[in-house]
Image (tube, helix red, strand yellow):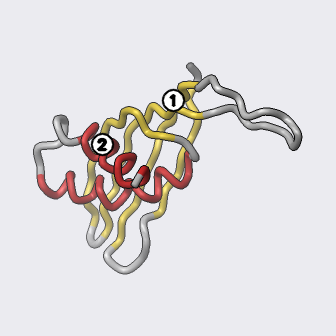
């Protein structure tokens, strides 16, 4: 249930900015791969570049992700949340799964 709300937030964050149906579909395909890579809740996402080359679609942009700091065994789970910024590149091919490259940006 939480995953559905979380995934809806990613697409909802992109939907006002994305008018093209092809971009919206590509963003939906990249959403699962990006969320697995950052290990947090995506609060905002933007598409900076959208390209098509033969059978491959490339999306580039930035993300704001809400994360909890890591804990060591025996420690309490922290209650505070850190807002992290990332840049991403997602490559979608008609034959393979989405390939995602995520880089952390300075705050």
Comparing labels 1 and 2, the label whose residue is closer to the camera: 1
User: The N terminus lies in which quarter of the figure?
Assistant: bottom left
> x and y percent of residue 50 in the render?
27, 48
Q: Is residue 60 left or right of residue 103?
A: left
Q: Is residue 107 above or below residue 18?
A: above
Q: Is residue 32 above or below residue 49?
A: below
Q: Residue furthest right?
A: 74
Residues under labels 1 and 2: Cα distance?
17 Å
- Judging by the rendered image, the residue that carries numbered circle 1 is 85
Q: Residue furthest top?
A: 107
Q: Is residue 90 above or below residue 86?
A: below
The local crowd at label 2, few if under 14, some if 14 to 19, many if 20 or more residues have their Cα within 10 Å, is few
- What residue is rendered at 53% in x and 55% in y? 36
Residue 49: mark? 2
> x and y percent of residue 80 in the render?
62, 23
Quarter location, residue 12: top left
Of mark 1 and mark 2, the one earlier in the sequence is: 2
Q: Is residue 64 above or below residue 50?
A: above
């Amino acid at each position: 249930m939480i995953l559905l709300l979380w995934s809806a937030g990613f697409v909802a964050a992109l939907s006002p900015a994305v008018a093209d149906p092809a971009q919206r579909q590509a963003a939906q395909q990249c959403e699962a791969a990006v969320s697995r890579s950052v290990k947090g809740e995506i609060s905002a996402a933007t598409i900076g570049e959208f390209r098509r080359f033969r059978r491959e679609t490339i999306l580039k942009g930035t993300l704001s992700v809400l994360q909890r700091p890591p804990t060591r065994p025996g420690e309490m789970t922290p209650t505070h949340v850190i807002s992290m910024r990332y840049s991403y590149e997602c490559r979608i091919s008609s034959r393979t799964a989405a390939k995602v490259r995520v880089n952390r940006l300075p705050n």
